[in-house]
Image: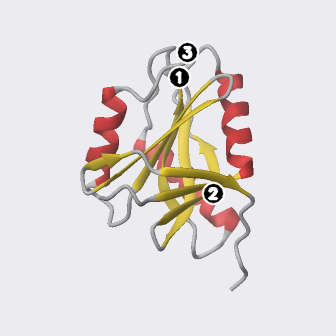
């Protein structure tokens, strides 16, 4: 994957992730990123939480069955054909970048998808690290935040 990938976050995503992260402290938490791909850009419309009852201050796991159920419910509520799973997010209670494990997992997971996957890591109060991977290769994409509107069919 080249470094020409752009990730555009809806303005509400940071607010949502910060609120969920704050509520979970001192534990890590995380979830799914919902959006779409178009011409070298990944648009992130929303972030939803996938609770890990065994999360600690240094670990959170996305349980696949729970994640799939939450994704299905979210997509049913939004009911727009463009939207789908585009990646994961999770928190680090103390400021630190994505771990080697985070990056390996992202790269490995990207092998299952035709489009790039995104990882957003949030550390309070205002640190957001974004990584992407495609076909097992990772990179740091260009990131922007703006209001996103999805056109009606």
Q: Position of residue 89 (x, y in %)?
A: 52, 40
Viewer-nearest residue: 134 or 89: 134
Question: How many dots with numbers?
Answer: 3
Residue lying furthest bottom in this view? 153
Residue visible at 54% across and 18% down in the picture: 95
Label located before the other in sequence (3 or 2): 2
Badges 1 and 3: C-beta atoms under 8 Å apart? yes
**Element type at marker 3?**
loop
Q: Residues within 10 Å of mark 1 (few under 14, many from 20)?
A: many
Residue 129 in the figure: left or right of residue 101: right
Q: What is the secondary structure assignment of the residue under circle 1?
A: loop
Describe residue 65's horizontal placement relative to residue 123 as left or right. left
**Residue tagged by mark 2?**
74
Calculate the distance from the C-alpha at mark 2 to the C-alpha at mark 1: 24 Å
Residue assigned mark 1: 92
Give above or below for 120 relative to 56: below
Residue that label 3 marks: 94
Q: Earlier in the sequence, mark 2 or mark 1?
A: 2
Q: In this rendering, would 13 be left or right of 32?
A: right
Q: Position of residue 45 (x, y in %)?
A: 64, 58
Depth check: give the residue in front, 78 or 41.
41
Q: Residue at x 43, y 59 (%)?
A: 5
The circle on residue 75 is none
Quadrant (top left/top right/bottom left/bottom right) for the C terminus: bottom right
Label 1, label 3: how far apart the Cα atoms are: 5 Å
Say above or below: 28 vs 63: above
Residue 120, x across and y down, in percent: 51, 40
């Amino acid at each position: 994957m080249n470094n020409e990938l752009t990730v555009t976050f809806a303005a509400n995503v940071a607010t949502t992730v910060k609120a969920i992260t704050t509520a979970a402290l001192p534990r890590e938490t995380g979830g799914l990123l919902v959006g779409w791909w178009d011409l070298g850009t990944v648009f992130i419309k929303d972030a939803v939480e996938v609770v890990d009852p065994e999360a600690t201050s240094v670990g959170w796991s996305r349980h696949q069955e729970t994640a799939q159920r939450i994704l299905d419910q979210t997509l049913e509520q939004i009911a727009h054909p463009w939207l789908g799973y585009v990646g994961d997010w999770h928190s680090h209670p103390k400021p630190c970048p994505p771990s080697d494990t985070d990056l390996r997992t992202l790269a490995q997971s990207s092998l299952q998808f035709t489009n790039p996957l995104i990882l957003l890591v949030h550390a309070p109060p205002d640190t957001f690290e974004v990584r992407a991977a495609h076909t097992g290769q990772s990179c740091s994409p260009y990131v922007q935040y703006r209001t996103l509107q999805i056109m009606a069919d």
